[in-house]
Image (spheres, coloured by chain):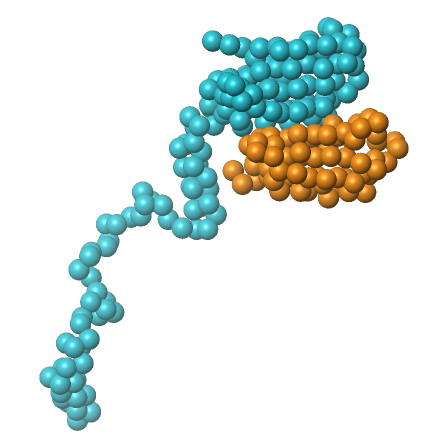
Amino acid sequence: MSAPVLRLHRKLYGARAVGVAMEAFSELATIALEREEAHFRLTFTDIAPDFTDVLAREFANYALAETIESRRQTG
Amino acid sequence: MSDPSILQLDPVTGVAEVALERNLYPLDVIYGAAYVLIDRAYLLLDRRPEDGRIVVRIEDREPGDETSLRALVGEFSNELLNQALRRKITRQNKVELEAIVTQALAGATGALLPGEIDDDDLDFLDDPLGIAVPWEEKFSKEARAAARAEDEQDGS
């Protein structure tokens, strides 16, 4: 099975938020980050068995929540 | 004019995609609406390069039937309006809110607001401490001589 890939738009997701999410999920998978022109491209490998189906989507939610919260804090 | 337009709605996978005009729905509004649903759905935001519209992918955490998925999308749409209205009201009331906060802070620190100063007894010419007298004038030879003469007179 191919490794799940997640693409988060760089104008919609904060770089710091993506970094925080990577750190939070680092124990559940190996996460590789590449910067494309408009997106952060995240590839998930060695995913913990219980999280195979949902990890990328949970990661996306986490990064989104982090983006929104940090945006609210900075006004 | 466009309401949030549904690009995709698949009850089997529980996935819906909604496209939003940036002019109608600022990013803060979209973020606010997404945040409300984040515990019940997987959300993914993206931007369409061809027209700049924001595409929100909403995936039900517990896929049901078409009705429940439509309800989720409807709730998201309502929340967009709710957030937009809240944003508008906040902007309209910004000046009043700032004035209230300023008054509250000034009251808490004991400072006087400009309107509260009773200036009947104040005269801008009053200078009881002599701070308006130039140094040269205050400590000139003549002034010191006069002060000394005054002291001697007091002493005698």
Chain letter, orange in picture: A
Total numbered circles: 0
Identify the image quadrant of residue A2.
top right
**Looking at the picture, how far across and down is residue B134, in whole percent?**
17, 72
Which image quadrant: the C terminus of chain B?
bottom left
Q: Nearer the viewer, residue B19 or B50?
A: B50
Q: Is residue B9 above or below residue B154?
A: above
Q: Nearer the viewer, residue B99 or B108?
A: B99
B80 left or right, relative to B156 = right
Q: Is residue A14 above or below residue B65?
A: below
**Looking at the picture, how far across and down is residue B36, in whole percent?**
65, 24
- Residue at 54% x, 41% y: name it: A74
B5 left or right, relative to B121 = right
Identify the image quadrant of residue B32.
top right
Residue A67 seen by the camera: no
User: Looking at the image, which residue sits at the far bottom?
Assistant: B156
- Residue at 59% x, 27% y: name it: B31
**Looking at the picture, how far across and down is residue B140, in whole percent?**
14, 82
A18 left or right, relative to A4 = left
**Looking at the picture, how far across and down is residue B137, in whole percent?**
14, 76
Which tint was used for chain B? cyan
Identify the image quadrant of residue B96.
top left
- Residue at 46% x, 39% y: name it: B101
